[in-house]
Image: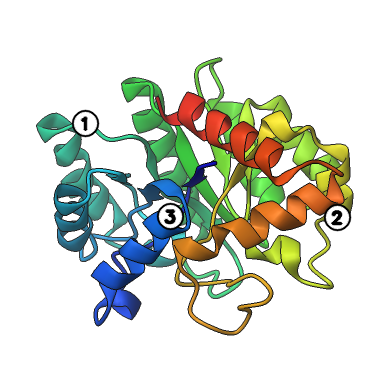
């Protein structure tokens, strides 16, 4: 049995003291691959260093919506130069976030459109962050969709209708620790949406699953998420691991 963590910020300063031990624990927990969505310009060097030392950890390139400010076009231009230097498994973490600050909403929307363009140009998936902004994110994806745009609605937390709308756009749903929370609200979605549309993620160091809730999250905790999905969908853990691993491999291949 093996798992793929489709979304983990293992380059985060939260892991500065024990990164190697944390990655060792991930491998002991049968985590075969980790996908690292970039955040901003400052996170790139550490991300690349991890990838070089651990080839099973893969870099994505993108600008997180919470790091979109007035200078976003200049930042994106610097990021785009990397696509001429090397290949990436995907674009991200892109998207819209209206939870923390709505000062730069127009800039966030433009940044998302630009990054959708990268995904289409390079024929790679885009990983979407959407917080309090699902409808606007979906609208942009629908407008940008040319039949080749695909990716993940990371940390999905919407309704069954939202989930179906995302799936209809050829996107997968990233399911993480929230699925294990008592009031996480994901049970109806997990019952309604076929396993072929789901991938597992931790969003490390955030959103640790029960029974680790409140602690720093890490990829080794991914099996707790798989276990919860298996319970909700009345499937074996092996079935969930095999299907979600295949989904991630097909998306990022």
Q: Is residue 196 left or right of residue 128?
A: right
Is residue 157 visible in the rendered structure shown here?
Answer: no
The residue identified by callout 2 is: 187
Is residue 188 visible in the rendered structure shown here?
Answer: yes
- Residue 87's label in the rendered image is 1
Where, quadrant-wise, is the C terminus in this rendering? top left
Q: Relative to residue 6, is residue 214 depicted above or below? A: below
In front: label 1 or label 2: 2
Q: Quadrant of residue 197?
A: top right
Q: Position of residue 33 (x, y in %)?
A: 39, 44
Q: Position of residue 99 (x, y in %)?
A: 61, 71
In this view of the protein, which residue sits in the foreground, 170 or 100? 170
Label 1: which secondary element? loop
Measure the alpha-carbon separation of dots 1 and 3.
26 Å
Q: Is residue 236 left or right of residue 131?
A: right
In this view of the protein, which residue sits in the foreground, 125 or 98? 125
Q: Quadrant of residue 224?
A: bottom right
> Of the residues under marks 1 and 2, which one precedes in the sequence?
1
Q: Residue at x 64, y 64 (%)?
A: 177
In front: label 1 or label 3: 1
Where, quadrant-wise, is the N terminus in this rendering? top right
Q: Quadrant of residue 209?
A: bottom right
Measure the alpha-carbon separation of dots 1 and 2.
37 Å
Q: Position of residue 193 (x, y in %)?
A: 81, 37
- Residue 188's label in the rendered image is none
> Of the residues under marks 1 and 3, which one precedes in the sequence?
1
Q: Residue at x 35, y 69 (%)?
A: 22
- Residue 107's label in the rendered image is 3
């Amino acid at each position: 049995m093996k798992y793929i963590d489709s979304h983990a910020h293992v380059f985060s300063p939260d892991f500065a003291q024990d990164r190697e031990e944390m990655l060792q624990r991930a491998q002991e927990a049968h985590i075969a691959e980790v996908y690292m969505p970039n955040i901003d310009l400052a996170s790139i060097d550490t991300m690349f260093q991890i990838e070089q030392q651990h080839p099973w950890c893969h870099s994505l390139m993108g600008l997180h919506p919470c790091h979109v400010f007035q200078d976003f076009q200049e930042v994106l231009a610097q990021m785009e130069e990397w696509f001429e230097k090397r290949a990436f498994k995907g674009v991200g973490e892109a998207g819209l976030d209206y939870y923390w600050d709505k000062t730069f909403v127009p800039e966030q929307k433009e940044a998302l459109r630009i990054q959708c363009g990268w995904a289409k140009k390079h024929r790679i998936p885009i990983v979407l962050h959407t917080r309090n902004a699902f409808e606007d994110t979906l609208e942009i994806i629908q407008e940008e969709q040319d039949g080749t745009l695909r990716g993940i609605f990371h940390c999905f937390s919407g309704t069954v209708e939202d989930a179906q709308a995302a799936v209809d756009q050829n996107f997968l749903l990233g399911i993480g620790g929230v699925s294990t929370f008592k009031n996480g609200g994901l049970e109806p979605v997990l019952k309604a949406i076929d396993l072929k549309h789901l991938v597992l993620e931790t969003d490390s160091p955030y959103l640790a699953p029960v029974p680790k809730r409140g602690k720093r999250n890490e990829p080794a905790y991914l099996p707790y998420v798989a276990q919860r999905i298996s319970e909700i969908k009345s499937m074996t853990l092996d079935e969930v691991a095999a299907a979600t691993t295949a989904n991630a491999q097909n998306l990022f291949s």
